[in-house]
Amino acid sequence: MSDICQEHDEIVRLVWASRAGDRGAFDRLVLLHQRQAVALALGILGNRDDAAEVVQEAFIKAHLSLGHLSEPERFRIWLLKIVANEAISCRRAARRRRIAMGLFAVAKARKQSEGARESPAELHEAVERAMRHLTDRQARAIALFGLDGLPHAEVAQIMGCSAEAVRWHVHRARKKLRVLLKEHLV
Amino acid sequence: MNEVNRDIDELLRRNTERQLADFDWDRHRQTVMHRLAVTQARESRRVVAVGAVVGVAAALVLTGVYACMSLLRGTHRDAIPPTETAAVQESVEDDLLLASTDPTTILLTGSMQLLVSNDSTLAPHSLWDQ
């Protein structure tokens, strides 16, 4: 408990220092939060490179808007919200690109021709493709739900809806993924 | 149902762990800080550029306003030459002189006297009757 309080106090102190222009303090904030941020973006996008790009952009936006953060103790929730929004924007842009390039049908045909073999590359491609079939809210909900140590109340705060609504989106997302990834389920 | 949910959650977790197993976190952090430095430098250059543009624009506007005012002052001075101004002034003074000797004007001039009374029985209008 005291460790959590100490970390909490450290984050508040780092946020104030970053606001004052201390680059080292922001570097430390990145160090403390980058794993959770990348895991969230990866959960929404299903692609590591896109996730890393999104998180870098989110950290820059967070730094530029630190002055607007009224409660520094809520930095983590605030940052994860920015990451989730950036990831959703990235998803939408990718969807628009796929539609424009007419690759949607090609990807679907390739998926149907694939067998049940599972290599790491195939699994992450399958997950990435399956995530595209979820709505933005479902993708956001299941990615946040999958993050370690994130209480459901915080997930609801990040998504801006009730805990029941989050559970509903997670339920719908699991149902879709169960069908789309049945070949990969042991 | 919960069993299947666990399977899905486990699959997603496994995928995340595998993809991030060889992720270079130090490099990622350095990239964030480098991109931040580049963004801040670009931002400060933009602020300087915007400041310069605003400064030049303000100087141009001030010069324009000054030029317009000078031009207007010049045309106004040209419109009534000094000799004509003196003539107009003399004419106005003559008119005033005539007005002051005009009998109608004299009749209108006079003095007014206020009567003050402590008598409370007198209504204000009765002072005029006296």
Image (cartoon, coloured by chain):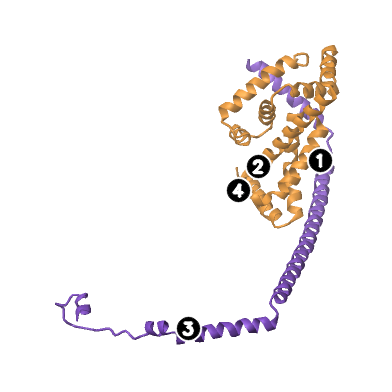
Chain colours: A orange, B purple
- Cα separation, mark 4 vs mark 1, equals 27 Å
Instruction: Tell me if residue A61 comes above or below residue A153 in the rendering.
Output: below
- State if disc 4 and disc 3 touch (CB < 8 Å): no
Front in this rendered view, residue B60 or A18: B60
Whether discs 3 and 2 lie on one chain: the answer is: no
Q: Amino acid at mark 2?
A: Trp
Circle 4 chain: A
Q: Which mark is residue A78?
A: 2
User: Which of disc 2 and disc 4 is earlier in sequence?
Assistant: 4
Task: Give how far across and how far down residue B77 sits, in percent.
Answer: 71, 77
Same chain, marks 3 and 4?
no
Chain containing the residue with disc 1: B
Mark 3 neighbour class, 10 Å CA radius: few under 14, some 14 to 19, many 20 or more: few
Tag 1: amino acid: Trp
Q: Which residue corresponds to the image point at 60% horizontal and 83% vertical from the top-left?
A: B89
Q: Is residue A8 left or right of residue B98?
A: right
Residue that mark 3 sits on = B99
Q: Split into 4 quadrants, where in the image is the C terminus of chain A?
A: top right
The residue furthest front is: B103
Q: Is residue B42 visible?
A: yes
Mark-to-mark CA distance, 2 and 1:
21 Å
How crowded is the residue under tag 2: few (<14 C-alpha within 10 Å), some, or many (20+)? some
Q: Nearer the viewer, mark 3 or mark 4?
A: 3
Amino acid type at image mark 3:
Ala
Helix, strand, or loop for circle 1?
A: helix
Q: Secondary structure at mark 4?
A: loop
Asked if marks 2 and 1 fall on the same chain, the answer is no
Query: For numbered disc 3, what is the local secondary structure?
Result: helix
Q: CA distance from mark 3 to mark 2?
A: 84 Å
User: Is A152 on the left or on the right of B125, as rendered?
Assistant: right
